Image (cartoon, grey):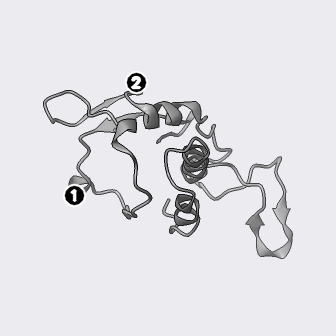
Amino acid sequence: MSPGLLPGFFREFKRNYDFSATQRKHHIIPLAQVDERFITDTVGNGQPSVDTTARDRLESTAIAIQPPGRSPNPFDPSVCSPTLTQASSLNFCSDRAPNCQDWLRNYVNKLVEDGFIAGSAISVVQNAPNLL
């Protein structure tokens, strides 16, 4: 899931991605075991690449999950939409604009629903730190 400030988020598959080379803040958390029959090794030269074509069952499931749309304030991912309500004095959006982490939760739920991973993955995602 990649952000786009004006149109919202879009899906892309980063092949041969090297987490050790990124400068983006990240936290790797083991999620679930996946049966190898659901994964296809991408043919190529091992160099990083980006595309939007699903190559296996997990990626096809990712394509089926709609990415979040445009945020009302793209520079503040925690902001509430003016049409959405805020919860009392907590200054917390009970119905804030969706973000990439919401998409990930929906994707993991669908993977569990379709039998690709165990249901315990849902609690792993729910308990993961929110990094924006």
CA separation in Å, label 2 and label 1: 25 Å
Q: Residue at x 64, y 44 (%)?
A: 71
Residue at 41%, 27% (x, y): give it.
54
**Label 2–label 1 contact, CB within 8 A:** no
Determine whether, in the image, residue 39 is placed left or right of residue 99: left
Residue at image position (78%, 75%) is 90
42 displayed left or right of 29 = left
Image spot of residue 85 (x, y percent): 84, 56
Q: Earlier in the sequence, mark 2 or mark 1?
A: 1
- Quarter residue 46 falls in: top left
Q: Which mark is residue 20?
A: 1
Disc 1 marks a residue whose amino acid type is: Ser
Marking on residue 67: none
Looking at the image, can residue 80 be seen? yes
Q: Residues within 10 Å of mark 1 (few under 14, many from 20)?
A: few
Label tally: 2
Indicate the position of residue 98 as horizontal and vertical percent values.
65, 48
Question: As drawn, which residue projects farthest toward the top?
Answer: 53
In the rendered structure, the answer to whether residue 9 lies left or right of residue 26 reads right
Q: Quadrant of residue 16?
A: top left
Question: Is residue 10 visible to us here?
Answer: no
Q: Position of residue 43 (x, y in %)?
A: 21, 27
Q: Secondary structure at mark 1?
A: helix
Nearest the viewer among 6 and 96 is 96
Which residue of the protein is positioned furthest toward the left in this rendering?
A: 45
Label 2 crowd bin: few (<14), some (14–19), many (20+), radius 10 Å: few
Give the residue type that dot 2 points to: Thr
Residue named by callout 2: 53
Q: Which residue is pictured at 34% across the width and 42% down the height?
A: 36
